[in-house]
Amino acid sequence: MAFSIQMTLNGDKRRVDLDDPRVTLLDLLRERLDLTGTKKGCDRGQCGACTVLVDGRRINACLTLAASLEGATVETIEGVADGTELHPVQQAFIDHDGFQCGYCTPGQIMSAIGLLREARVHGDPERVREQMSGNLCRCGAYAGIVEAVLDAERQLAGNTERGAA
Amino acid sequence: MSDFAPIVAPARQPQRASIGQPLKRREGVAKVTGSAVYAADNHPAGMLYAVMAVSTIANGRVSGLDVAAAKAHPGVVEVMTPANRPPLAKNPDDRDNPFMFRLDVLQNDRVRYANQPIAVVVAETFEAATEGAALLAPTYDAEPPQLHMNADEAAFVPESVGPGAPTQAAVGDVEAGLASASQRLDATYETPDQYHNPMEPHAIVAAWDGDRLVIDSPSQAMTIARGRLAGLFGIAADDIFIRSPFLGGGFGCKGAMMSPQVLGALAARLVNRPVKLVPTRAQMYGPLGHRGATRQTLRLGLDDTGRLTALSHHARTTSSVFDEFFEPAANISHTLYASPAISTSHDAVRVHTGTPMFMRGPGEASGSVALESAIDEAAHACGMDPLAFRLANYAEQEPISGKPFSSKRLYDCYAQAAERFGWAKRVLAPRSMRDENGLCVGWGLGTATFPVVMFEAEARAIIRADGTGVVETGAQDMGQGAWTALAQIAADSLALELDRTVFNAGASDLPDAGVAGGSGHTATVGNAIDAAGRDAIARLIDMAVDDADSPLHGVPAEQVVARWGRLQAGDDAARSESYADVLRRAGMAEVEGHGRGRADADVAERYAMHAHGAVFAEVKVDPDLGQIRVTRLVGAFAAGRVINPRMVESQFFGAMIWGLGFALHEKAETDPRSGRIMNADLAEYRVPVNADVAGIEALVIEEHDPHVNVLGIKGVGEIGVTGTAGAIANAVWHATGRRVRRFPIGVADMLDDDAATG
Amino acid sequence: MKPFDYLRPDSIDAAVAAAQAPDAVFLAGGTNLLDLMKGDVMRPARIVDITHLPALNGIERDADGGAWIGALVRNADLAFDDTFAHDFPAVAEALLSGASPQLRNAATVGGNLMQRTRCAYFQNTASACNRRAPGSGCDALDGLNANHAVLGWNSACIATHPSDFCVALAALDATVEIAGPEGRRSVALTDFHRLPGDDPADETVLARGELIVGVRLPAEAAALAWHSRYLKVRERTSYAFALVSAAVGLAIDSQGTITDARIALGGVAAKPWRARAAEAGLIGTRGGVEAYAAAGRAAFAEARPSGDNAYKIRLGQNIVARALARAAAGTPRELPALPGSPFATEAGELAHV
């Protein structure tokens, strides 16, 4: 059962051929489109390592059937930086040591970007902790992750203000 | 040379020593952009996907596999079973040393634990391989499994515990100490099976080129892994190339080469194409190691002043029915508290599980939670503040051996963490503190300790004609920060700035860096690098002082110092020249030094060498609903020299969170009849989530240790697990009066009347 | 995963028709379906993807204050709809206490109603489970059952329904709108899920091919918004299923008398459990600690352990009492940082005053 879907992937409109409807978005990215930044930790929606943005919202790519994404906009970790210019969330993760082994990090960063787009943190670390709880970090970098998200929120707010002025 | 791009620091560092600087992770950009390549990210041309089928019984034989159904599934290329598995040169049930584990690589139809690999399906796609494995629909001749560690009649005393430690140890007369005590405590604590669960499974991408094997697979010990594979496949170690630039966490389960990885290499051999095999998360609960359950009995004798008269610590552990690893849980009582009489002992029961093995803080983690709980119970029995009680029993020399400590700043750890935490405001009686919302508040303390472990490592340091340096060793970064911390040591060893030093690691064709484990990687490899760098400098100095055209000509070599790319005669800045000048005049492209790092047996004979720490925990418990939250953790640790305080703090945080998981969350639930692990996932096997870590601080206590090794490094990776779990359990008791001796502590424990023994 | 036909119909009628085939399932958010397919717990032969049906994706308000929620509305979109959350705060709090942000962004209203039990023996295909494999038995009865049902169970099945959302819906008299080959019908949410009976596999009232198109909340439910909470006890602070949870709503008149009371329980039965006797005992009273404790006892009057889970009865009683006390104190203007949690701090402005 071969068919194709149209999607916008990291800003590029593309047609993706699928020979098998069982392929998840995660396996599509990793095994067929050579976008291996998105990681598989549990493949069951229990760890968040595969977090990507679909239509601007963070979701678990492992529980998303690629076939259902006709017309969708997908953003992955590979599309976050602007050339060599890191996204503020990426830089904040480095600055606050928000990772150790790095395996959960792409998912954490995509989740953090999604969270900041949801605009419900308001500088409250408790809200960051709760809203980042869909991303397990076995190394235990949570303290740095929370600081990074708060720092990025401040920076993005500053950018917006400057942009408006 | 390894074939991945060397990592170079993004910004020029100021001209100063790199060691001690809180540098950011040098591989950070790679990790935050998704460009860091982990094993499963590799995709050589022609690669096929392999998926394991695993047993659903814990004991018996596989009586049938529907290979035809699997092969008939579109895309399936081959099914590997005991019938067609390529031969091995070595019996996978043989083992030569304590770091080698017996494997389940389809050598027969025997099943000895649930989730044991019983076949491998290889297909053109992951989807086809997965469904092929499901279609095998195995049948079994099942036998009743032995699952219960309480089977006293089956208990035995193993030959050794941990990696070759004695099963028993004693000093003084414990029974006499107990008999003379004015108070005695006798308490039994239980800890469950726990699973490492690194976020990255043990992926392997294996490609054969004739009898040469190239694999991408996360490894905490590439040289050991290579040796293991060489033995199994009957090829030379040099014909195996392992790339492991980044591990997605290790925690002890990626030290040995495990069955799924060997099966990946076997499958690649069978189909004669590159193969990727990644265990599912569920398959991580079986063939890939775990922390074995323990049941520990502590007997403490106390005199009128709250001093220990005797300390007896017995640990029952479990191991598999086919291999040897026994959690050395009681041995933590050798070192921590002064007592005129101490005895430790172990016995074990074999159960139908995968073999337990090293897991972050092996022995110490499980032992600590029992010992620290018992110490807390003893303090309460004496009516003493838990910190005062620990200070009253402070060990000035190692109790079991009588040796002096090479260094020990535990007192400062207690003092500074207590101050930071506000311990002085603690109310002595349990159940006496509440917050503004009516939640019970408890404050608890645990002492942390971990031995100084060194393996063996080699490094190579090169000074190049352009005055830059290259340092190479097959070190493994599982997140602890080797790419950064070892590079800092490398730069200092060559007296170069960090951005003029290339550091290569993470591949098996580099000098053997030993094991990233035992909290000993930085100490071992760091000292190898330090020696290599100094060796290279010494060779360069010899060239300079022998060279009539050098401003250093004739200066005694021992008076020449290396500073930031230049050699100089003592303090005489006028007599100096650059590394590049020395090499240029000599017409040499580079000068190379070599170094080794390993424990000094003589020092170990004379000193007890341990890192120490103190962890204070605040928990809140809802008095009616029983839910528990750790609201604050404050640790202070003295662990010798700190190479990178930023990374060290992260190590302490991570391990403290492991302690939190130990106390409140982690437990594999085994069905009491089938032996299947019923929560083999990341939803019901609970590791802490972000919201579980409400407040965490780690203080680094500066400690100069002139004995442990040249650089004075002790190690920081595991100590944070110890102390923390006990501190939390003690805080739960202080909040509620409920002394829970079976871990993890959960909601039901807070609601069950019988648990209130305070 | 078994190979399946993938269909993407362009109308509700076409979807219903496509799902008449044997072993057909609807795909919405996929968060539960894909998980179960990966575990081979479900092996459908046909997937009918309804995610592209716009008619199922909207939140509509009635003139009288009621609400209609399309079956495809994502959990997060519903919880973050400020008007909806203002009027049905317990629903929003229940939604936000469940799963993770990623799952809430994908999971749908209809899918939440259809999610299957977390019972490990249901999830593990090697185990006996009457719900997954009718007639095979129930390994949970003598197995690991600390998280199992204390109400409405029988020896055929002791599993619980895992939803948070449905608990709040049950408290608020929600109805489920269903499209089928015979047309449309509505069912009370409290009647939508079945208790085990003789055939635990028969989990809902849906017939083959029937599709949930939406959920309706009556106007009376919005009248409870001043005093409406969800409380959930779990072993982790977040990202964990409930051990026991409760959704409550109160209407309190100007004299302080309770004129309406709603209590529903999660994690205790194979369906969200409405505690009507406990509600009746509160109406006409002025509430208070004793009254809430009595309501807790009444809610669990018929509870009995199905295994190693007697603690859930006391826990459930206490949750009901605490949730009522929280609700009586007033719904907070902004949901707490830890929605549904015992550790949600009670500080902050109240809404609806």
Image: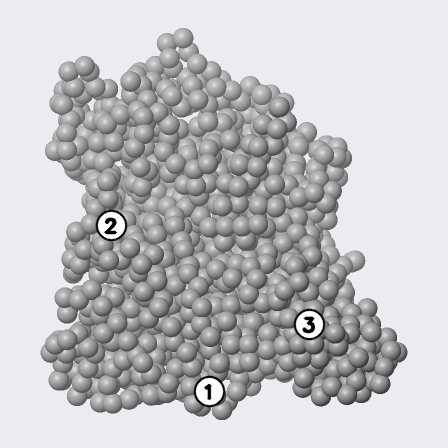
Quarter of the rendering occupied by the N terminus of chain B:
bottom right
Which sits earlier in the primary sequence, circle 1 or circle 3? 3
Q: Which residue is mark 1?
A: B604
Give me the chain letter of mark 2. Answer: B
In the drawing, does residue B223 fall left or right of residue B709?
right
The amino acid marked with disc number 1 is Ala
Q: Nearer the viewer, mark 3 or mark 2?
A: 3
- Residue nearest the viewer, comparing A91 with B515: A91
- Residue at the image position 24 percent from the left and 23 percent from the top: C250
Query: Quick one: SS at disc 3?
Result: strand
- Residue at the image position 53 percent from the left and 72 percent from the top: B517
Give me the chain letter of mark 3. Answer: B
- Residue at the image position 49 percent from the left and 58 percent from the top: B650
The amino acid marked with disc number 3 is Arg
Where is B661 relative to B367, above or below? Answer: above
Where is B573 relative to B478, above or below? Answer: below
Q: Position of residue A113 (x, y in %)?
A: 57, 38
Report if residue C289 is visible in the image.
yes
Report if residue B661 is visible in the image.
no
Give me the chain letter of mark 1. Answer: B
Which sits earlier in the primary sequence, circle 2 or circle 1? 2
Q: Which residue is mark 3?
A: B563
The amino acid marked with disc number 2 is Val
